Amino acid sequence: MKSSKPLCRASLGLLLGSLLATQGVSAAQPLDARASDPAALGLMQGFPPAAEQQVNFRNYLQFPRTRWSFSHIRELVPTVAVARGSVQVSALPRELRTDIDGLSIQVADGSSMTWEQSLAANYTDGIVVLHRGRIVYERYFGALQAERPHTAFSITKSFVGTLAAMLVEEGVLDDRAQVSHYVPELKTSAFGNATVRQVMDMTTGIRYSENYADPKAEVWEYGMAGHLMPRPAGYQGATSFYGFLQKVRPEGEHGQAFAYKTVNSDVLGWVVQRASGQSFTALLQERIWGKLGAEQDAYLMVDEVGTAFAGGGLNSSLRDMARFGEMMRNDGRFNGQQIVSSAVIADIRRGADPALFAKAGYKTLPGWSYRNMWWVAHDDHGVFAARGIYGQALYIDPKAEMVIARFASNPIAANGANDPVSLPAYAALARHLMGQ
């Protein structure tokens, strides 16, 4: 949405340059994974770090500073903890394999590389592979360490989508009801007459663009409303996530096509909180995170009034993200209990209408769909995934009994940049683990 007063050209230029840098929109080839390693660059080293090596709120979205900032988000923006609780840490037995790094991968362009090379190609910060609930592969790069949380970006959406699906299955939330039934404040916005289901599956007809190359795209005010990026002098737009959501206008009809737009997730977060009477943070802790036997607290980015960023604010350790994936692979059962009902998992895995999904034009995901804020492959392995920009992934292959949790800091945000390598690599590893 546009603010009521145009941004000054100088301020807009600075912001646009910052965000375009995160998209890899530059005449110069970005540094490769080795050269952009934060230690190699000297980022945030020294007491204090030299000015040119500092990472702060003004530059944390710029590559290669993202190679450090994505593992240090709570030092840069406001956050709230999602407590692991007092339960004993759940076991993840280790059976590390030495035959994975050299696995040959044929990527989308027909060329070959090894599994290890594929990690560098996509600027992997860390990756954990579970096979039948055991860690068979675990590596960390850059600023990430086993005990350090990393931003998960839009993997967050799959958590709020799962919670919503749980409330629907329990009868607490009616996915056929209009959004305005739960959030009257959105009655006059584009979301008011959308159903909860249309929000959950992102088939709303709304005017909202996440094209960072367009200075008029609505994502600009959205990011500044949540204070995820600096606001220029004279800014008069929304100053909270909820304030922005009330300004979103309609475009097209609800239910006609899938369109990936982050604001749907924050609307769903608002709906879920109203239906349950709990904050997203409390609900996530009580219903999922506190039951996993997580090693670490997770945390969520929040705006100036404490609203958690349901569209992309979760940060967690890599092994804990793998625990969540293993729970989903096992039909909702993990750590000796049924955390999510098997009916909810089945509903997610069934997916939605691939024909509606196809209208979005995702060339790297033919035949997929989007259900309850999960990406569903509709392939012979029953693959489903949670995905986030810059290469965050939670990839679940039920047939191969495999879960992959990966955090990354690719210089290009869109997953279309890493899918041509990552998706063939994941499929090849699944076949390898199955002994094929």
Image: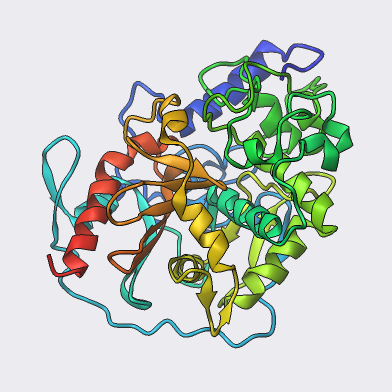
Residue 374: image x %, image y %?
Answer: 50, 48
The residue at the point 69 percent across, 63 percent down is 284
Farthest residue in the right direction? 184
One can see residue 219 in this view:
yes
Q: Residue furthest bottom?
A: 88
Quarter of the image with the N terminus is top right
Quadrant where the C terminus lies? bottom left
Nearest to the observer: residue 125 or residue 143: 125
- The one nearer the camera, 379 or 307, is 379
Q: Tell me if residue 189 comes above or below residue 152 in the rendering.
A: above
Measured as percent of width and height from the top left, residue 417 is found at 34, 35
> Residue 136, located in which quarter of the rendered image?
bottom left
Give left or right: position of 228 versus 5: left
| Colour setup of the view | rainbow
The mark total stands at: 0
Residue 337: give x, y in percent of width and height: 58, 81
Residue 178 shown left or right of residue 284 in the figure:
right
**210 horizontally vs 382: left or right:** right
Q: Residue at x 22, y 61 (%)?
A: 429
The residue located at (23%, 48%) in the rendering is: 424
Q: Residue at x 67, y 39 (%)?
A: 228
Location of residue 68 with respect to 323 vertically, above or below = above
Residue 214 drawn at (x, y percent): 55, 16
Q: Nearer the viewer, residue 201 or 107?
A: 201
The relative height of residue 249 versus residue 34 in the rendered view (above or below) is above
